[in-house]
Amino acid sequence: MGLFRRRTPPPARPDVEARPPAEHDGHVDRGASRLWSDGFGRVGTRSLQILAVVAVVAVFGFVGTRLTLVVVPVLIALVLAAAIYPLVAFLRGHGLPPLLATWISLLTLVALLSAIVWLVVLAVVDQWDELRSQALDGFDSLQTYIQNLPFNITDEQIASVRESAVSLLQSDAVGSGAIAGVSQTADFVAGFFIMIVVLFFFLKDGPAMWEFLLRPFEGHRYERGQRVGGATIRTLGGYVRGTAIVATVDAVGIGIGLAIVGVPLVIPLSVLVFLLAFIPLVGATLAGILAALVTLVAVGPVEALIVVAIVVGVNQLEGDFLQPIVMGRTLRLHPLVILFALTTGTVLVGITGAVLAVPIAASLWRAIQVWDGPDLPARFARKKRAETV
């Protein structure tokens, strides 16, 4: 213990007078500590600190990308648990045992997801022949329309594109491509079961797990952990539930419009609209483009323009009326921050990262907002002055 014992400095000798610092060539030797106290020194210190933080984040990011089979299912389970935990709390509040309430909530979620998948597969199988024939007719109409354009497109080019499309629709390329696309079925199934198991325990023992993680903290640090945990879960759950409501309205509205126009595969396209709505900024645009393309090749250019108008109208209704009411202040992020989080998540984890990045970023920002109190953000995020722009 003597190695780590703080040593008290010896008392100053009264017979030794304080001597001024040594001078070298007319300049006072200020010591190494003074070297880091000027402007460049402070910049260097902050740069080293930033590099250290970036290195730690990079290590965690590298480990996370190598353990996606575990990290991604756990994140998905956390988001789903935050979304459906109010149902568990409701069932517990009405006298159901925790285990039974958890099983009911989990089985309800699994049944809902299974029904969506079944509807999509059934609609694709039933309407694929119709889509194939309508697409061929649509290509013929599109060929006639293209020939009347002011710029020159040769018949050979049109015939080449048509033959490629016909060979794709009349062969098994689509089915074989779908099979090739699930070449990592084992990983998907393993990740799905990991997600289900983790989700079960999050729903059943989530608060107890968080209390266990807060055991090392006491006093205001423990209260901070409670605030951060509660704010994070509320933000995640509110975001997912609000987005699900908005996505459902989008899917129903656009699906009704597609059915009126006579577009095939209405149910799969509506489900795709619902799923893409969970990707902020670009999801609705991608869904509209895909619906318009299917309408163009299967029905015609005029109907495609009608579908574009329907998609734009539904999205305007969502953005100006529905989303502010349903989402409220759940997602209080600047669009540039949303775009940055969306891009980062997509690059790191793919489509799953695109879905999870924004709610996680919103939850982190909400945690910062309650860091020092229920309405007191962390010091660096506080408003220090009147900000006028």
Image (cartoon, rainbow, N blue to C red):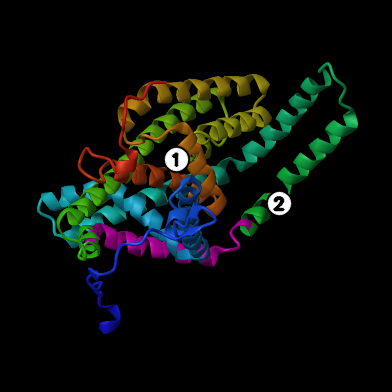
Residue at the disc numbered 2:
173
Crowding at dot 1, Cα within 10 Å, few <14 / some 14-19 / many 20+, comes out as many
Residue 190 visible? yes
Q: Within the magenta stretch, is there residue 204?
A: yes
The vertical placement of 90 against 375, above or below, is below
Element under disc 2: helix
- Which is nearer the eye, 297 or 377? 377
Magenta segment range? 181-206
Percent of width and height locating residue 350: 55, 51
Mark 1: secondary structure: loop
Mark 2 crowdedness (10 Å alpha carbons): few <14, some 14-19, many ≥20: few
Which is more toward the observer, 81 or 303?
81
Which residue lies at the image location 58% right of the left edge and 59% below the top edge? 182
- Which residue corresponds to mark 1? 278
In the rendering, at what x and y percent does residue 224 appear?
22, 51
Amino acid type at mark 2: Ala
Q: Residue at x 64, y 59 (%)?
A: 180
